[in-house]
Image: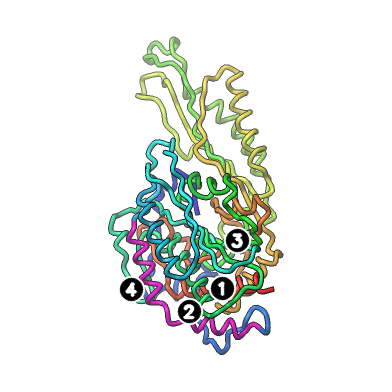
Amino acid sequence: MILGVSSAIRKRSKATLYPPGEARRAACAPIWSLVACARFRSISDMPSPTPGRSNIAQRLLAWLEPRENEMAALLAEMVSVSTENPPGKHYQACADQLERKLSQAGLTCERHEFLRLPAAPGTSVEPAASLVASFGAGQRTLYFHGHYDVVPAQSQKQFQPERKEHFVFGRGSCDMKGGIVSMLYAMRALRECGVDFGGGRIALTLVPDEETGGARGSAWLASRGLLGRDGIGMLLAEPTSGVIWNGNRGAISLRVKVLGKSAHVGLQHRGENAFEQMVSVVGRLQQLKHEVEQRQTSYAVGAEQTRNSILMLGGESGGGTNFNVVPEQCWFTIDRRINPEETLDAERDRLIKLLEQCRRDGIRLEWEVLQEGRAAASSAEEKLGRALEQSVKAVTGQAAQFEMCPGLLEIRFYAAMGIPAYAYGPGLLSVAHGPNEYVDLRRVRDCGAIYALTAIEMLND
Ligand SMILES: [Zn+2]
């Protein structure tokens, strides 16, 4: 999940670390703690999402259950390749590693390489490879989707993965290399249990660059018609803490610079005060903020969030050189987070028009777009939504709630094509991007079972 370009770089989340053995008592996220408490249930009492398919479900689960050590080893290997983004390190090494693992699993794999040098300063010049690995031969395609880039580590030790009992610690273990392991093992389980989809296939799409907006990953694949072809649905392995994210807020984030003219305080009449001009711009933005923040989404949101649309001002700001000098320039950021009911184009236009009006009124200013991404939502009532919900219940014994994700998700690229898309993964959002990132291997295994059962529901018609 991407929280924002600048936050991806600078976020130092207060990750909550539960030592092994404590996780079950963790009280931070009620839904997650319920899931964490649910042992991988014995195969014999495991209901299948659809009666009559219990034999397949049992075979899958029996195949997955003893493979925790294998999964831990694969995850540790992946974590040790430091795919930090920005700037986008070691993408080739990681893609090579994944391609090897996918072909060892008997999956056919396409590789698409973004070769052009990126324009953005500070971005790696390495080619950025995306992989699409398939199982099954039919046209109707259920997409599994994951990103292999990770946010920058707080310490290089995070690339030396550590296993403690049922937990793997390290950068990307939770967001979201652990989820990729679940998806790969779901496909292996289906293949090795001899599941034969009548007229469909699973395509696991693995991309870089997600943490900075997907320019060389999903956005590029989508622009070339390589994303979501013949898609009937998409599952994304982000760390959802036990809930299903069926939507995400969109984002447009700007940095606005207001220009003035410097002068000594004693001669301030010769200067132009950029700060005072900026206050006037901010005042107009506050009126817009007041208006748009009345809007509420009808989608469910997490316990600590509100349904209101968001226009946050001054997440970062600065300007001036000294208290006794008329400030020559001042700047601030705007972070606009839109609900699925709003459209990015219209909300971007509102902001830009307001800034243009300021210019016409004589305020000298310029702006740059730091990031933008569309909101997306899929109804919980879609067949895939119901299949995922039932599979979660079948494996964990607990119902999963549908909620809107507060950050950007790559479900948006699929939803924009009319493909129902949902995020559900083994990690905890509260430890993603933090210094003590970890994933519970039992959840990695459970999610493998959940993805496999969901695929059977969707493709075995
Ligand atoms: Zn992520």
**Looking at the image, which is closer to me, 326 or 249?**
249
- In the rendered image, residue 300 lying in the magenta stretch gets the answer no
* Quadrant in which the C terminus appears: bottom right
Disc 1 to disc 2: CB gap under 8 Å: yes
Which residue position is annotated with label 4?
164
For label 2, count other residues whose C-alpha is less than 10 Å away and answer few (under 14), some (14-19) or many (20+).
many
Q: What's the distance in space between the residues labelled 1 and 4, CA to CA?
A: 27 Å
Residue 10 in view in this figure: no
Q: Which of the two residues, 312 or 75, is positioned nearer the viewer here? A: 75
**Can you identify the residue that label 2 sits on?**
64
- In the image, taking residue 355 as reference, residue 185 lies left or right, namely left
Is residue 370 visible in this depiction of the protein?
A: yes
Question: Which residue: 63% across, 52% down?
Answer: 376
Mark positioned earlier in the residue sequence (4 or 2): 2
Residue type at mark 4? Lys
Residue that label 1 marks: 452
The nearer-to-camera label among 4 and 3 is 3
